[in-house]
Amino acid sequence: MTGAALLRMRFTAADLPILRLRVADAGAAAGLNQARCDELVLAVYELACNAILHGGGGGALLLTRAEDSVRCQVSDEGPGFVSDEGPGFAGPAARRGGGLWLAEQLTDALEIDGPEAGGAVVTLMVRCRSNSRQLAD
């Protein structure tokens, strides 16, 4: 069950600095420790950059608290995910960035969806816990 919105905003490239600050404030208010909050900020930043670059120049963000987790949904109105292999994550060696891959590594769950009419919706979840997941060297 999803709780009340901690943060709801539309964004473009010009809004990225304030988006990072607002996500950090919302994550801290939701009870994330500093390490988990930093991971949330970076993951959401990567999704927002993808929405700007590939989704029509901007998007919408909805961050909520759900039980012991923070849930963030980033949506855009671009062409959606187009691939011969279907939706999926770009690996770190992909030719064009690894924002989705990085966001998946930093969070506890990541789901990609796209409405029939186009666009993309990416939802991530970060559990409120004291030990954060570390990226492998």
Image (tube, rainbow, N blue to C red):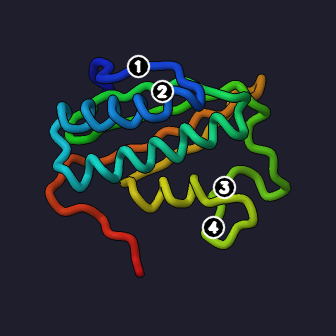
Q: Residue at x 75, y 65 (%)?
A: 95
Q: Nearer the viewer, mark 1 or mark 3?
A: 1
Q: Which mark is residue 8?
A: 1
Q: Say which amino acid is labelled 3.
A: Gly
Q: Secondary structure at mark 4?
A: loop
Q: CA distance from mark 1 to mark 3?
A: 26 Å
- Say whether residue 43 is left or right of residue 127: right
Q: Say which amino acid is labelled 4.
A: Gly
Q: Which mark is residue 131?
A: none
Q: Secondary structure at mark 1?
A: strand
Q: CA distance from mark 4 to mark 1?
A: 29 Å
Query: What residue is shown with label 2?
Result: 61
- Sequence-wise, the earlier of marks 2 and 4 is 2
Q: Residue 38 in the image: state x and y as whole percent.
A: 30, 50
User: Are dots 1 and 3 in contact, CB under 8 Å?
Assistant: no
Task: Establish if 91 lies above or below 136.
Answer: above
Badge 3 crowding class, 10 Å Cα cut-off, few under 14, some 14 to 19, many 20 or more, is few
- Sequence-wise, the earlier of marks 2 and 3 is 2
Query: What residue is shown with label 3?
Result: 88
- Say whether residue 114 is left or right of residue 27: right
- Front residue of this view, candidates 47 and 126: 47
